[in-house]
C-alpha cells in the first residue's frame, strides 16, 4: 500500500475533528494543517508501486476513508481517535522500514 494513504485519516481528523458540526466553526489553522498533510501524503504516493498505480490507490483510498470517517465520526467518535493513532503509528513504522532498509 502506498505510504501516503496512512496520512489521509489523520488529515481528515485534523480538518474536521469530532465536536464541530458546522464547517464555519472549525478553526482555519486546523483546516490548513489538514490540507498540508493531504498535500504531504501526495508526495508519498509513488512508494512502493510507482506513480500511476500509486495515484489510483490513493484516490480510491481517499474516497473510502472519507466515507468511513464521516460515518464513524457521527456514530462512534471514540473509534476515530483510535484509528487516527493507529494510522499515524503505521505511517511511522512503514516509513521507517523504507528509510532504514
Image (cartoon, rainbow, N blue to C red):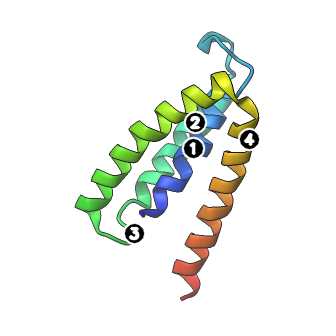
Q: The N terminus lies in which quarter of the figure?
A: bottom left
Task: Work out whether 20 lies above or below 52.
Answer: above
Q: CA distance from mark 4 to mark 3?
A: 26 Å
Badge 4 density bin: few <14, some 14–19, many ≥20, Cα 10 Å: some
Residue extending farthest to the front is 75
From where the camera sits, is residue 28 visible?
Answer: no
Q: Are marks 2 and 3 in contact (CB under 8 Å)?
A: no
Kind of element beneath mark 2? helix
39 lies left or right of 73 = left
Residue placed under numbered mark 1 in the picture: 9
> Which mark sits nearer the N-terminus, 1 or 3?
1
Q: Quadrant of residue 73?
A: top right
Q: What percent of the width, then of the height, locates residue 80?
A: 68, 38
Q: CA distance from mark 1 to mark 4?
A: 10 Å
Q: Which mark is residue 81?
A: 4
52 lies left or right of 27 = left
Amino acid at each position: 500500500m502506498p505510504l501516503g494513504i496512512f496520512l489521509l485519516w489523520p488529515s481528515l481528523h485534523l480538518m474536521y475533528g469530532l465536536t464541530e458540526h458546522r464547517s464555519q466553526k472549525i478553526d482555519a489553522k486546523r483546516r490548513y494543517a489538514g490540507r498540508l498533510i493531504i498535500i504531504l501524503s501526495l508526495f508519498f504516493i509513488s512508494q512502493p508501486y510507482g506513480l500511476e498505480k500509486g495515484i489510483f490507490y490513493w484516490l480510491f483510498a481517499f474516497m473510502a476513508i472519507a466515507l468511513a470517517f464521516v460515518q464513524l465520526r457521527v456514530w462512534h467518535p471514540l473509534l476515530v481517535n483510535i484509528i487516527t493513532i493507529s494510522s499515524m503509528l503505521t505511517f511511522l513504522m512503514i516509513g521507517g522500514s523504507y528509510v532504514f532498509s
